[in-house]
Amino acid sequence: MARTPLDEAQQAIGYTFRDVRLLDEALTHTSYVNEFKDQGSKDNERLEFLGDAVLALIISEHVTAVCPGLAEGALSKLRSRLVSEATLARVARRLDLGKLLRLGRGEECTQGRDKESILANTLEAVLAAVYRDGGLDAAKSFVLTSFAQELDEVARRDADGELSGDYKTQLQEWCQQRYGGVPQYVTAKESGPDHQKTFVVQVMVQGKVAGRGTGRSKKEAEQAAAQEALEHVKRTS
């Protein structure tokens, strides 16, 4: 029997659904529903809303258990980093959710499958689908597995809850050893008011985009871009 896209999606996320319609909904962007109203599909916005809350609960429980000495403010900072759009998009890319999405033509033409906001929202929707289908234990298992790399770094945080990984330095050392040069960082986008700006940064390796990151400061966005680039070069080297 031929494998369906939903079969591939279940294999990618490591969970088999009892009600596969939940997964279908989680992978359906509103742009698709708006263009194909006659199909009666549901978009993933309601699941995304639920998934945001479920993820916050699971991550909060995890960091309080793993970091018993951290104060409330430091725990909040750590949780914010772990549930940020940049982190969620990075996890979604590892799961290859972009290629599994159902998108409208407009989003397809504007590279919607690689937009951080769409990827992050889709991951939250998929988490909610797992929660609705299998309960909190299944949702925890999905998060702990999917976020394993990010959660491993929690043990290397400082007293303020900052993760200690200096990805820019690691990427620079790798590039110097491999190519004899250094990566270049380019601010691709700035948005929001002055007191609450969001930055999108791309990191270029050998003239090609190797990673992209989002943050509340250029420094944070550069670190996120460097982390994604490191994952990319390790997979392709």
Image (cartoon, grey):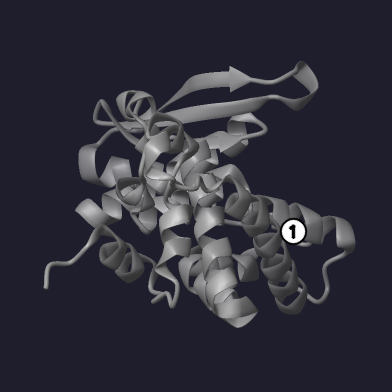
Q: Is residue 213 left or right of residue 38?
A: right
Residue 131 horizontal side relative to residue 234, left or right:
right
Identify which residue is drawn at 40% across, 68% down: 20
Q: Residue at x 39, y 67 (%)?
A: 13
Front residue of this view, candidates 226 and 118: 118
Tag count in the figure?
A: 1
Residue 59 appears in the rendering: yes
**Crowd rating for badge 1 (residues with CA inside 10 Å; few <14, some 14–19, many 20+):** many
Residue 114 seen: no
Residue in view at x 47 percent, y 67 percent: 146
Is disc 1 placed on a helix, strand or loop? loop
Residue 194 point in image, percent of width and height = 76, 17
Q: Position of residue 147 (x, y in %)?
A: 51, 65
Residue closer to the observer: 165 or 54: 54
Which quarter of the picture shows residue 162?
bottom right
Residue 8, quarter of picture: bottom left
Residue corresponding to mark 1: 161
Residue 29 placement (x, y as % from top left): 45, 41
Give the farthest residue toward the left.
1
Residue 124 or residue 86, whichever sits in front: 124
Q: Examine the rendered structure and indicate whether residue 55 appears above or below residue 132.
A: above
Q: Residue furthest front?
A: 38
* Kind of residue sitting beneath label 1: Gly
Q: Residue 83 at x, y = what percent?
A: 63, 53
Q: Residue furthest bottom?
A: 137
Q: Relative to residue 83, is residue 139 depicted above or below?
A: below
Quadrant where the N terminus is found in the figure = bottom left
Residue at figure coordinates x 61%, y 38% from the top left: 220
